[in-house]
Amino acid sequence: MLTPFLIAVTSGLISLLVAYFTAAYKFSRDRRMLEHELNQRLLERLYSLRLERYPAAFEITEWIRRKRRDEGGINSREELLEIQKQLWAWKTGEISLVLSKDALDAFYELVERLKKPCEDARNNRYSDVQIDKIIFARNNFRGILRSEIGHRHTERRDHA
């Protein structure tokens, strides 16, 4: 008489445990899927903002050019200071939220190089070392921005 009761209780408990663990697994899986979907949407928004805003930085930094030595070797001090102001204006606002740490570090390195005074102040000329450092900082900044946009394209190609 007790045996059918124990069988019923045991099977009920087993069914309850199976239902509980199934529900817990499903909840956990759904949660992971939602987190992944949210991360993907945020990543899409990040890249969308970068694609929208990074070209302006390329347009600004395009004007930093090496010139013949008899022409000063690079842009004039005034031009470089104007470019520096334009870069600060570009960085203000939403773009500060989407720049990676590497891009931000490269940005600060570039504006730091642009604001340094000419070593040959008498002739208002930058030294060859200064010119090399400015051009390197420009190329590094542009390279990091390009890689952040290009990384997304590479990632998309890998998943296709």
Image (spheres, rainbow, N blue to C red):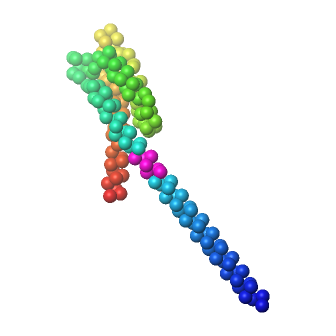
Q: Is residue 39 magenta?
A: yes
- Residue 115: x, y in percent? 39, 20
Which range is magenta? 38-44
- Residue 111: x, y in percent? 40, 25
As displayed, is residue 81 above or below residue 28?
A: above
> Which quadrant of the figure has residue 28?
bottom right
> Which residue extends farthest right?
2
Q: Position of 75 compared to 41: left or right?
A: left
Nearest to the observer: residue 13 or residue 159: 13
Please state, as top left, top right, bottom left or bottom right, where the N terminus lies in the image. bottom right
> Which residue extends farthest top?
122
- For the point 61% across and 69% down, the residue is 21
- For the point 34% across and 19% down, the residue is 82
Q: Magenta segment, principal secondary structure? A: helix
Nearest to the observer: residue 49 or residue 133: 49
- For the point 46% across and 54% down, the residue is 37
Please state, as top left, top right, bottom left or bottom right, where the C terminus lies in the image. bottom left
Q: Position of 16 compared to 74: left or right?
A: right
- Residue 109: x, y in percent? 41, 28
Nearest to the observer: residue 112 or residue 54: 54
Q: Is residue 42 magenta?
A: yes
> Which residue extends farthest bottom?
1
As displayed, is residue 139 above or below residue 19?
A: above
Nearest to the observer: residue 63 or residue 40: 40
> Which quadrant of the figure has residue 11?
bottom right
Q: Is residue 126 visible?
A: no
- For the point 62% across and 74% down, the residue is 18
Q: Position of 123 compared to 98: left or right?
A: left
- Residue 47: x, y in percent? 38, 43
Numbered circles on residues, count: 0
Q: Is residue 56 visible?
A: yes
